[in-house]
């Protein structure tokens, strides 16, 4: 494996598990109940990340490509929460971790696809 690809995979892993931890901690302890039950919020925010976890940990290139697209939605949610008066900190955290997930998974997929093309 390319040395730089491994670095970008670790950035994606930090972004993924950072998002998971942030969503669980914020929605469990730090926020007040909103209009939706917490179980629905967990399902909306955590299920897409749960489907990506095994593929990112295994280093599957196609899953990293899907993760870069999924991270764009979390970036959008991060801006949404950043503009909400009581949840700016949550928005900043979500923006940081989702940007790490996006950048790490995009660069990993890009580097590993280049390696595959060179070998063919």
Image: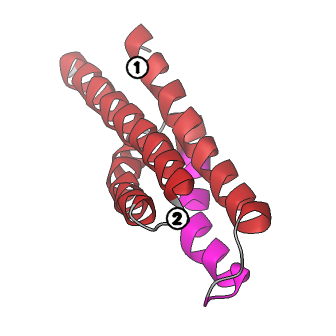
Q: Residue drawn at (50%, 42%), measured in percent from left and top?
A: 97
- 106 vs 32: above or below: above
Q: Residue furthest right?
A: 29
Specify the quadrant that holds the C terminus. Answer: top left
Span highlighted in magenta in the image: 35-55
Q: Residue 54: within the magenta? A: yes
Which numbered disc flags the more N-terminal residue, 2 or 1? Answer: 1
Q: Residue at x 44, y 15 (%)?
A: 1
- Residue 2 seen in render: no
Q: SS of the residue at dot 1?
A: helix
Secondary structure at badge 2 equals helix
Magenta portion: prevailing SS class: helix
* Residue at point 61%, 90% (across, down): 35
Q: Is residue 117 left or right of residue 45?
A: left
Mark 1 Cα-neighbour bin, 10 Å: few <14, some 14–19, many ≥20: many
Q: Is residue 52 within the magenta segment?
A: yes
Query: In which image quadrant can residue 114 be found?
Result: top left
Q: Can you see residue 98?
A: yes
Q: Which residue is mark 2?
A: 48
Query: Nearest the camera: 114 or 37?
Result: 37
User: Colour scheme used in the picture?
Assistant: secondary structure
Query: Is residue 33 shown above or below 114?
Result: below
Q: Residue at x 63, y 84 (%)?
A: 34
Counting from the top left corner in percent of width and height, residue 19 is at 58, 49
Q: Which mark is residue 5?
A: 1
Within 10 Å of disc 2 (Cα), the crowding (few <14, some 14-19, many 20+) is: few
Q: CA distance from mark 2 to mark 1?
A: 23 Å
36 or 107, which is in the foreground? 36
Q: Residue furthest bottom?
A: 35
């Amino acid at each position: 494996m390319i040395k730089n690809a491994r670095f970008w995979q670790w950035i994606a892993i930090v972004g993924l598990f950072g998002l998971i931890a942030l969503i669980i901690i914020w929605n469990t302890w730090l926020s007040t109940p909103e209009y939706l039950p917490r179980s629905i919020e967990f399902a909306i925010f955590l299920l897409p990340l749960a489907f990506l976890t095994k593929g990112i940990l295994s280093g599957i290139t196609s899953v990293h490509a899907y993760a870069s697209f999924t991270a764009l939605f979390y970036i959008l949610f991060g801006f949404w929460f950043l503009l909400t008066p009581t949840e700016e900190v949550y928005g900043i955290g979500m923006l940081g971790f989702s940007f790490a997930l996006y950048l790490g998974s995009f660069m990993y997929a890009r580097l590993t696809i280049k390696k595959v093309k060179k070998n063919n």
